[in-house]
Image (spheres, rainbow, N blue to C red):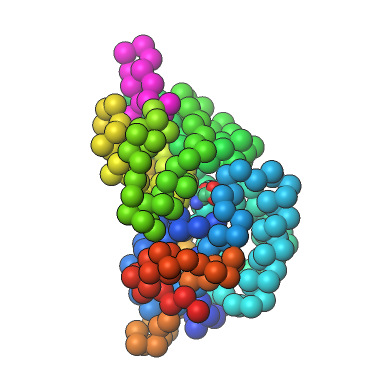
Amino acid sequence: MAVASNASCPILMFDSGVGGLTVLREARVLMPDRRFIYIADDAAFPYGAWEEEALRAHLLTLFASLLERYRPALSVIACNTASTLAIDSLREAFPGHLFVGTVPAIKPAAERTRSGLVSVLATPGTVKRQYTRDLIRQWASKCHVRLVGSDRLAGLAETYMRDGFVDEEAVRAEIAPCFIEQDGARTDIVVLACTHYPFLVNRMRKTAPWPVDWLDPAEAIARRALSLAVAGADQGRPSDEIRDIAVFTSGKPDFAVTRLMQGIGLTVP
Ligand code: DGL
């Protein structure tokens, strides 16, 4: 198995916005001595609305400059919308670099469901992907999987994280199509297939028509990153030297998001 070769290099954590922070918080627990660089491609948010070819080209161009600039030990694509589209292209374009992807947790959902009714809540982009359909065919052929594309939830999560405000009625409306009853059975698992969504899970629980398991793959992704970064396990930097940073592709994060990043210990250069 390939492992990150240079333990002193940072781990790059990438998303279109604040969603990747749900993965970062797990990664920091598992790798307290690693340095992280959080990249929010806010200039291009939301990815869910992008046309596929344009987004793939954008990601390849952006990663060429990110890898050159930050020379990370590995990169975590903490975004389903980007991973389901471009993880293979990124690996092909940068063969010497390790990428950890984030894809809908369809396999664990299919293993856990008791009713056989599973919903995958994601951006419109992730729902459309061939990658997502292949996961269903490969792992969940015995389940009834409903794909639910949400135009609004990623934006609602951004607002919540910046301003502390959630439009509960909008959350209720966005998650409603996840809940189906069929032949006396009910949906019992909703896969959170966008890294922004775990921030809203309490509101989802509150507005759901019945209780379900909300599957958040953040810890599993962090574990995968840890397994590739094992070279750094006992060579980390002393903690007072650790400087995690958050970089915004817009170059001009507003006050609210800067405060959010600083509040979780990320310096905004
Ligand atoms: N956080 C991203 C994901 O996991 C999507 C948000 C967006 O639409 O940009 O899919």
Residue 174 occupies quadrant: top left
Q: Residue furthest front?
A: 255
Q: Which residues are magenta?
A: 177-189
What is the x, y in percent for residue 245? 47, 75
Left or right: residue 213 compared with residue 56: left
- The correct choice, above or below, for 35 with respect to 24 in the image is below
What is the x, y in percent for residue 46? 56, 49
Seen from the viewer's position, the closer of residues 176 and 234 is 176
* 196 in the magenta segment: no
- The correct choice, above or below, for 196 with respect to 147 in the image is below
Residue 208 occupies quadrant: top left
Q: Classify the position of the N terminus by image quarter.
A: bottom right
Taking the image as drawn, is residue 51 in sight? yes
Residue at image point 38% right, 15% down: 182
Seen from the viewer's position, the closer of residues 20 and 155 is 155
* 188 in the magenta segment: yes
- The correct choice, above or below, for 166 with respect to 78 in the image is above
Residue at image point 42% right, 46% down: 156
Seen from the viewer's position, the closer of residues 46 and 117 is 46
Taking the image as drawn, is residue 220 in sight? no
- The correct choice, above or below, for 14 with respect to 193 in the image is below
What is the x, y in percent for residue 238? 36, 87
Q: Residue furthest top?
A: 183
Residue at image point 33% right, 21% down: 186
Residue at image point 30% right, 41% down: 203
